[in-house]
Amino acid sequence: MGTPAERTGTWAETLLTFIQRYPGVHLREIRRRLGIPIGTLDYHLYRLGKRGLVSVRMQGGYKVCFPETLVGEGPPIPELDKVLIALLRQSVPRAILLQLYLEGVASPQSLGIAVGASGPNLSYFLKRLEALKVLEREGAPGQRQVRLRDAKRIHEILLRYPPLPDTVIDRFLRFWSELHP
């Protein structure tokens, strides 16, 4: 188990590595994935921030964490990409962008069905993604179509910043919800 100082060093290193691997991850997800108590997590984020290694900010109701530099990558993540990456850490926006990337143009109704989002939830994220100039909606009401503005950019971001891997619990909850609609 080691001394408190040894555990502290390990926690800080583990935390920094995790944030570098999954930029834009929110605080509760870090806590859930790494099993670090919230007080300890706050302490280490503060210390890593003071050393200029990470930044923490509020975005979309979540505290999200970004590395100031990626391992072996050089410059920091551009500001506009940070906003998009943090959105991609949420399941609905990620599903929307993946659906549009893989299938192309879609009506909001078919997109909502494909990603399993309610109308208000879908509308909220479509507006956010549209404001970021990631997608656009075209056509008259009732005939609207949604499309990606720059599929290549989405492809690059998804490759460069991979989603968090599913845990056994994530897979079980998805399986359970499919059995009990």
Image: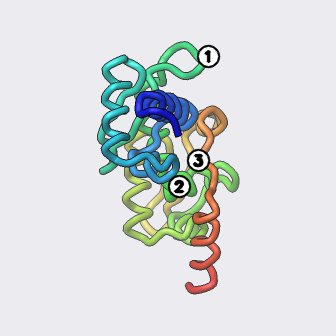
- The residue under label 3 is 164
Q: Label 1 vs label 2: CA separation? A: 37 Å
Decide which of tag 1 and tag 2 comes sooner along the chain. Answer: 1
Q: Nearer the viewer, mark 3 or mark 2?
A: 3
- The residue under label 2 is 146
Mark 1 falls on what kind of element?
loop
The answer to whether residue 66 is seen in the rendering is no
In this rendering, the answer to whether 6 lies above or below 117 is above
Q: Label 3 vs label 1: CA separation? A: 20 Å
- Residue at left offset 38%, top offset 52%: 127
Q: Three-letter amino acid code at disc 1?
A: Gly
- Place of residue 63 in the rendered image (x, y in percent of width and height, measured from the top left): 33, 43
Asked if residue 26 lies left or right of residue 181, the reply is: left
Mark 3 falls on what kind of element?
loop
In this rendering, the answer to whether 52 lies above or below 135 is above
- The residue under label 1 is 72
Q: Assess disc 1: are there few (<14), some (14-19) or many (≥20) residues with their C-alpha within 10 Å of its C-alpha.
A: few
Q: Three-letter amino acid code at disc 3?
A: Leu
- Residue at left offset 42%, top offset 55%: 125
Asked if residue 122 lies left or right of residue 162, the reply is: left
Q: Three-letter amino acid code at disc 2?
A: Val
Decide which of tag 3 and tag 1 comes sooner along the chain. Answer: 1
